[in-house]
Image: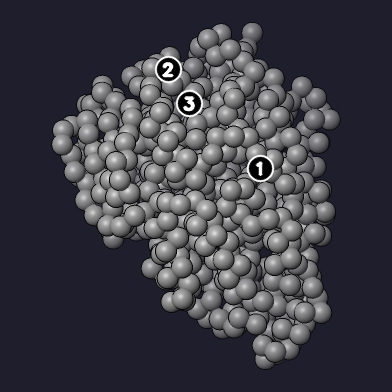
Amino acid sequence: MYETNNIGNNESEGITRRDFLKWGAAAGLGMSALSIAGFPDLAEAQKIPGSKSTLDNTKATKGGTLRYRFFADPPTLDPNAHISFATYMFSGQVYNKLVRYDFGEGVDPLNRGLVPDLAEKWEQPDELTYKFHLKKGVKFHNLPPVNGRELISDDIKFSLERHLNPAVSSPVRHYFSELASIDLPDKHTVILKTKQPFSPMINYLASNFSWIVAKEVIERDGDAKKTSIGTGPFILEEYVRNNKIAFKKNPDYHWNAHPHVDKLEFLIIKDHSQSMAAMRAKQLDINYLYDKMMVDELKKTNPETKVLKLAGASLFIMFNTEKPPLDNIKVRQAINHAINRQAINDSVYFGDSGFTSMIPTVLPEWTLSADESAHLYRYDPALAKKLMAASGLPKGTEITMNLCEIYGPHIMDTGVLIQENLKEIGIKGVINRLEYGAYLKAWPEGTFQINLGPQVTFIEPDEWTYGQFHSQASRNYSKVKDKDLDKKLEEQRRLFDKVKRKKLLDEIQRELAEKAYQLPLTYGVGYYCMQPYVKNFEVPFWYGLALDDTWLEKA
């Protein structure tokens, strides 16, 4: 249960893509535009005036301060230690990765290919080997103790191995658990070898959490919580909790002519009404809203506001299956069929959402069909009551549901609807409203019964399956221990044949629906609201919100 996502940078002139596209396709990332059920015209929705797909970037105005609304303080600034949206959106300004997902003109917003970031090119000579050639002359930020030195291959090795260090408590440790070795033939070459065929490898290197850190910072401080030094487009200047995170332009950034703005500010505004007031007063340049009604209200008073609608984070219920009563499969199954997802879509999302499977709708190559998802997660009160009777759970049993309103008023609205659904089958649902830090802390600690919230849109299907349900996975917050499921989860990771992998993942998704360890509720929709002078802002769907390509056209 996590959050939203983003990326940026389209300046790829002079960079070879042939190897990247070849192996991106092998990992299951097609480049053709796909129609997403329930998301009509999403690709067109991104082509608003001022977006990357409609503007000539050579006309960009330099300078100014871009002010972006941030929902909450990051739980940590260490890019390898948390999967919070606030952490990885911060990280997207300061750090880079080996590879990233493509975006920009002519690229379908929901179907990204892989392109270079710190790597100039790569080859995969066999199913166990990945060879990366780093860009030369890439510099870390010119701050002590790193002092602007060149990025070298040892930095890649150090950063990837850091995820496997128990002291870091990386929530994505399973990304790199299959690494057998990291060899460094020279200072600009990295060779990764896996223990066995591991099809998610490339996608995991491009994920929101595979940032490359400066070794000197970790060796001096023990972590990256206090000092943030990377190779990214912006340099951290100041962080005042509950106020703002301020950055300045990195003059040595390895993508030429970027960033366009001199300064970037993340203004921490937790209250959505306050964020709307700031937009009206031109104190904010970009604001993200989950609530369509709030967007409509803003447009009434400020009709010049540009709105970018796009697929957002899907909403899920996470069960703690380690403790009664949710260790009882009948109780979990009853809750599945007691929830009226159509009512959530109609009354909370105003018809903008719909059914999804465990692998969400925004990954059309891997998800189940909309019809099958609707059947597996159907509203069936009679069946739910029958399952409850079979469970033996006493009528009136209390079950607590954690939620955090930092994500928007729709979270509480959804919680209230679910509470009413639970009442119909004899469960007394108790809503536990938590502040952001406590909400996040409860997952790994297992101090919850039900957790209601959004999940970031991981592009790799292994993250939705192995990452959350394998008994040894670092994000198995539902505490699942299922040996038969473990075997299937391990097998799908070894498959490079997309057809065979899809077949097995379909089987896994059906099993997850049957066992109800987690419950997908709806796929999400979000709205980026921008001042009319904000140009070239396009949400790169699979990154950490890079804003180096955005510019301001002000008088």
- Quick one: label 1, few (<14), some, or many (20+) residues within 10 Å? many
Task: Give the label on residue 311, or none.
Answer: 1
Depth check, front residue: 212 or 360: 360
Q: Which residue is mark 2?
A: 13
Residue 137 versus residue 332 in the image, above or below: above
The CA distance from mark 2 to mark 3 is 11 Å
Q: Secondary structure at mark 2?
A: loop
Sequence-wise first label, 3 or 1: 3
In x, y percent, where is residue 338? 75, 73
Please name the residue shown 64% across and 57% down the image.
368
Q: Secondary structure at mark 1?
A: strand
Q: Nearer the viewer, mark 2 or mark 1?
A: 2
Quarter of the picture containing the N terminus is bottom right
Q: Which residue is mark 3?
A: 9
The CA distance from mark 3 to mark 1 is 20 Å
Q: Do residues under tags 3 and 1 come within 8 Å of each other at their CB atoms?
A: no
In x, y percent, where is residue 91? 42, 39
Q: Secondary structure at mark 3?
A: loop
